[in-house]
Image (cartoon, rainbow, N blue to C red):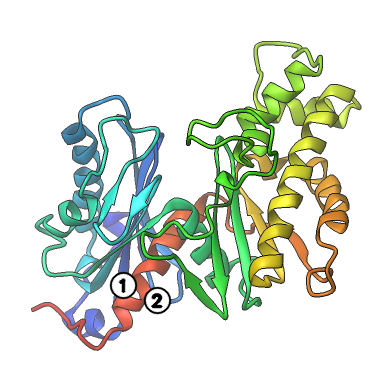
Amino acid sequence: MSYELAGAVDRRHTLAHPLLAALDIGGTKIAGALADRDGTLLHQVRLPTPARGSAREVLGAVTRVLDLLARHPTWPSVRAVGIGSAGPVDIQAGTVSPVNIPAWRAFPIRTEVATHPAVHGLPVALGGDAVAMTAAEHWRGAARNHRNALCLVVSTGVGAGLIIDGTLRTGPTGNAGHLGHISVDLDGRPCPCGSRGCLEGLASGTAITRTALEAGWRPTGDDTSATAVATAARTGDPAARHAYDRAARALAAGIAATATLVEIDTAVIGGGVAQAGDILFHPLRRHLTTYAALPYTTHLTVTPAQLGTDAGLIGAAALALPLLLSPTVTARG
């Protein structure tokens, strides 16, 4: 929606139709949106992340996104703000330490956003990007008809979140369900997290490329991404197919372990690696029949995420929705 077409919004409209502001902070881009209470994105803006800049330079990009959102005529209807950020995060402290933004370590993003002039006085919610994706897919996506679900983002890393008894369960620091750093290979490679054999080291896009190259895959050009490996797998390249099979097996083991522990009934998978489609999902479902063997896990389903690149913003809005519904949230004068 452009500024020019949005038109003026009178005060009665702002009171009757409260909105949510959403921020999606990642190593590549910082996006912002205005959303209604049904999760529909009404207006979006986006700026590149100065990921190698100073902490203040990165914050400056966040500030500019908020400035752009605040210029929109419907901004007076905003009643709460949600932030979904690359992590790790600490929702108790309101801080983030994104791996791909080196200058942000224990950065107080919730406080910084709350003190922005346009936000001042509004409640602000914070969550990790995978938790935001989980909230989004449960609210409006592939997990919306499930009370117990695991939602994963499989990309350059592997993140996840949990829906238990119909409620997003984040844990005290906001990192519950972080499946990427569960060990699925006891003698596997050391992981940067300090453990070894982590799921992320076998199933992330980077891991898929490494496995394929080690197995003898040779790219036709300079593209060594997991997408290129998937393309080769579709043509029958054995090393490429092996890499995806190994990633799918690791995901199946992690998903089945989660189902055994907390009785989920579906796993929703998004992120760049999920774009491989059946190259990933066929072996994943096959391996899941081996690992999800107990009677209360055999009904477990696996499905692709539905919200695509909008998931981060919808999820950030979802994190703010309970604040919007709180009786303490009132209209600003």
Q: Residue at point 53% right, 49% down?
A: 309
Q: What's the mark number on residue 37?
A: 2
Q: Which image quadrant for residue 142? A: bottom right
Q: For this view, does 314 lie left or right of residue 201?
A: left
Query: What residue do we see at 60% from left, 59% from top?
Result: 151
Q: Quadrant of residue 79?
A: bottom left
Helix, strand or loop at disc 2? Answer: loop
Give the amino acid type for the residue marked by disc 1 in the picture.
Leu
Q: Residue at the far front: name it.
A: 187
* Residue that appears at 82% across and 71% down: 299
User: Above or below — where is 115 with respect to 80?
Assistant: above
The amino acid at mark 2 is Arg
* Contact between labelled residues 2 and 1, with CB atoms less than 8 Å apart: yes
Residue 284 rendering spot, x and y as whole percentages:
80, 49
Task: Answer few, some or many: residues within 10 Å of disc 1's Cα (few below 14, many 20 plus, some between 14 and 19).
Answer: many
Q: Which residue is mark 1?
A: 19
